[in-house]
Amino acid sequence: MSSSGSAKYQYLAAISVNIITISYGAFCGWPSASFLELTSDKTPLETGPLTKQDQGWVAATICLGGLFGTIVFTWLADKIGRKLSILWMALPNLLGWIIIPYARNPTQLIMARFIGGAAGGGIFAVIPIYIAELAADSIRGVLGTFLVLTCNVGVLLAFVLGYYFDYATVSWIVSTLSFVFVGCFWFMPETPQYLAKLKRVEAAEHSLRYYRNIRSNPAKELSEELQLELQKLQTAEKITDGEGDDDEEDAKGVTWSDFAEVKTRKAFFIGLVLIMFNQLCGCFAMLNYTAVIFEQSGASMPPTMAAIIVGAIQLLGSYVSTLLVERLGRKVLLLLSALGIAFGQSSMGTYSYLKLLEYPVESFSWVPIAGFSFMIFMAATGLLTLPFLVISEILPPKIRSTASMILMSVLWLISTCTIKMMPIFTASLGMHGTVYMFASLSFAAALFIAIYIPETKGKTVEAILASL
């Protein structure tokens, strides 16, 4: 079932749905590529160069939009289905890019970032659910890593385009991805698990046949293994709802009592802490200020070129994660990632502190780029990539959408705070103090992962929940 022939439509679905993630990734990388232009005397804004406060709001508003989008699109995913909910994300994604070229003041840029961020909220909340519900257990991890892999493709795309074009031209170029996404993803069926939840058994079987690449005709019978998978989908809601009152329970939806079971609470707790460390390690916040960080650290390389190199390294890290996630497992990659982040941040902080004390560090000007690059590479192999996959794997099916909405909302709130506070941290603590703070949190993440995170590689949802 995991052979290339039976899995090709699962790969096709994962690639198609993540085209919009490329566009959102470019949205994430856009500030780093554009702030140098927007803060210069040659800024196209009628109000003049962006102030430090304006930079903070323009960068951070994408996360407030993400919070809004998480709530809206997760709700839609349960009401109209995973597929339609994801298709609707193309609208705010497109609007966010189109508004940017016409923006003439910080408020209009902030509005564009909020709207585009709403699409990102839906992307990181619903796409992991979509992938978890269609993928076979043997390739679920690989397909799950496509989310951050393609997001990093978008980040690098923004860095490269920002090097050659002005920020308005970049917006027009990347906006075309919304149309490509709709054209490719339109033909994908709804997930078998969602259809089974609606008791549309025939449609669920058709969807399962498509994603497992089995011809849909009476002569081609489902294998015993796939019949068992379809039967499991049909009974999943009964298992989580309890026997006998399925229709009544479905009408009520998810209630607080569904979180009362010990294993469910533990799964939610693990997801919550993972999401917190995903942002508190500081990598996403620092990514928004890549070019600015290199400029402040006194690196000899032009900041925009340094950002491109970092973007390429981040993409490489995501690809390594895709290659290793089904070999080493989630837990090992997460642990190595957290330790690597802490090491990279410590080297950056040490260089910045010695430079502040006026030690002769000119011959070590490569350290900020090397440390930042290593940090981003290690983050992309685990802590920035895998929490979304692990969360979609450990949460019970009935509460998956609701719990994912809560966890992603927490993520966007913390993201907003860290990105908005980044200039304030560097002003009050210095670059060295800020990076040391993030390094200590990364060490704490490694400790938590070593103690609490279960290995989910190749396991069914039932087996994962049983291991908690």
Image: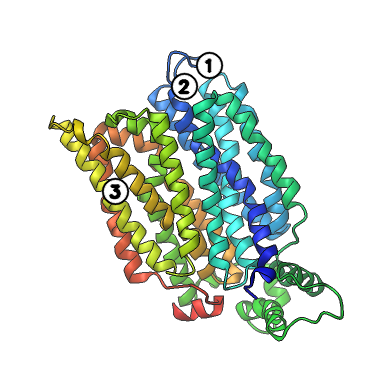
**Residue at 49% across / 16% down in the picture?**
43
Three-letter residue code for mark 2 = Glu
Q: Check the image and tell me how it is coloured.
A: rainbow
Q: Which residue is mark 1?
A: 44
Looking at the image, tell me whether mark 2 or mark 1 is earlier in sequence order: 2
Quarter that holds the C terminus: bottom left
Q: What amino acid is labelled 3 in the image?
A: Gly
On the image, the x and y values in percent for residue 422 come to 35, 37
x 27%, y 37%: residue: 366
The x, y position of residue 338, in whole percent, is: 34, 57
Residue 359 spot, x, y in % from top left: 12, 32
Q: CA distance from mark 3 to mark 1?
A: 36 Å
> Can you tell which quarter of the image residue 430 is in?
top left
Q: Residue at x 47, y 65 (%)?
A: 325
* Of pointers 2 and 3, the one earlier in the residue sequence: 2
Q: Where is 132 relative to 275, above or below?
A: below
Mark 1 crowdedness (10 Å alpha carbons): few <14, some 14-19, many ≥20: some
Q: Are marks 2 and 3 in contact (CB under 8 Å)?
A: no
Q: CA distance from mark 2 to mark 3?
A: 28 Å
Badge 1 amino acid: Pro
- Per the image, the residue denoted by label 3 is 344
Real-space Cα distance between discs 2 and 1? 8 Å
Quick check: can you spot residue 288? no
Residue 251 lies, in percent from the top left, at 71, 68
Q: Are marks 2 and 1 in contact (CB under 8 Å)?
A: yes
Quick check: 340 left or right of 274? left
Give SS at disc 3: helix
Residue assigned mark 2: 37
